Amino acid sequence: MNDFYESVYEVTRQVPPGRVTSYGAIARYLGTGMSARVVGWALNVCHDREPYVPAHRVVNRNGLLTGKVHFRPVSSMQELLESEGVKVEEDAVVNFLAVFWDPMTELNNQSPG
DNA sequence: ACGTTGACCTATA
DNA sequence: GTATAGGCCAACG
């Protein structure tokens, strides 16, 4: 698999439980060289990746579980998030701004507390 | 090789 | 805030 995909999974796995990030955030973190669409595709094939990729922790910039339709069962994505503490209503993350996790800000310059 | 589609984001009115 | 248009890259037909 291309290093690009691995990078996407790397960042996705970096997302802590109880938090969520957006495709664009991952794309931008990698270097905006690619589009957020490709990130989604990488996550689409994540079901075949070796380590477990918490793709359910990735939502669009609106916090909507647009990718839930690709989970089996479809409700697994929401159940997984809720199981981690992320409340979900109407296929949308509750308090998205609070649980929002940005790799380019969390990984680049981790606040010392 | 060409055209269409897709787990998206950004800019403009 | 809502609605419309463009860009980006990869995979499928």
Image: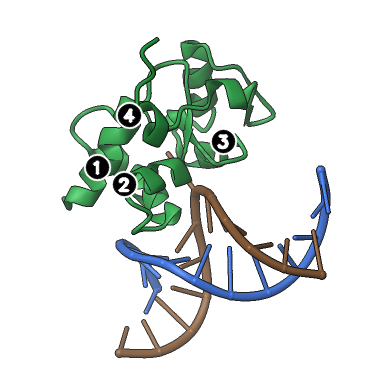
Chain colours: A green, B brown, C blue
* Chain letter of disc 4 in the image: A
**In whole angstroms, how far apart are the C-alphas of marks 1 and 4?**
13 Å
**Residue assigned mark 4:** A107
Task: Indicate which disc, 1 or 2, sits on the residue closer to the N terminus.
Answer: 1
Percent coordinates x, y for residue B10 in the rendering: 57, 56
> Secondary structure under badge 2?
helix
Q: Residues within 10 Å of mark 4 (few under 14, many from 20)?
A: some
Mark 3, residues whose alpha carbon is within 10 Å: few (<14), some, or many (≥20)? Answer: many
- The verdict on a common chain for dots 1 and 2 is yes
Frontmost residue, A54 versus A23: A23
Q: Secondary structure at mark 4?
A: loop
The chain carrying label 3 is: A
Badges 1 and 2: C-beta atoms under 8 Å apart?
yes
The percent coordinates of residue C10 (x first, y second) are 30, 62
For image coordinates 33% across by 51% down, the residue present is A31
Give the quarter of the image for residue A54: top left
| CA–CA distance in space, label 3 to label 4 | 24 Å
Residue type marked 4: Leu
Residue A58 lies, with reference to residue A5, above or below; the image says above
Residue A7: mark? 1
Q: Do the numbered discs 1 and 3 sit on residues whose CB atoms are within 8 Å?
A: no
- The amino acid marked with disc number 1 is Ser
Q: For mark 3, what is the residue?
A: A65
Q: How far apart are the alpha carbons under marks 2 and 4?
A: 11 Å
Residue indicated by mark 2: A30
Mark 3–mark 2 distance (CA, rounded to whole Å): 22 Å
Q: Are marks 3 and 2 on the same chain?
A: yes
Badge 1: how crowded within 10 Å, few (<14), some, or many (20+)?
some
Specify the amino acid type for callout 3: Leu
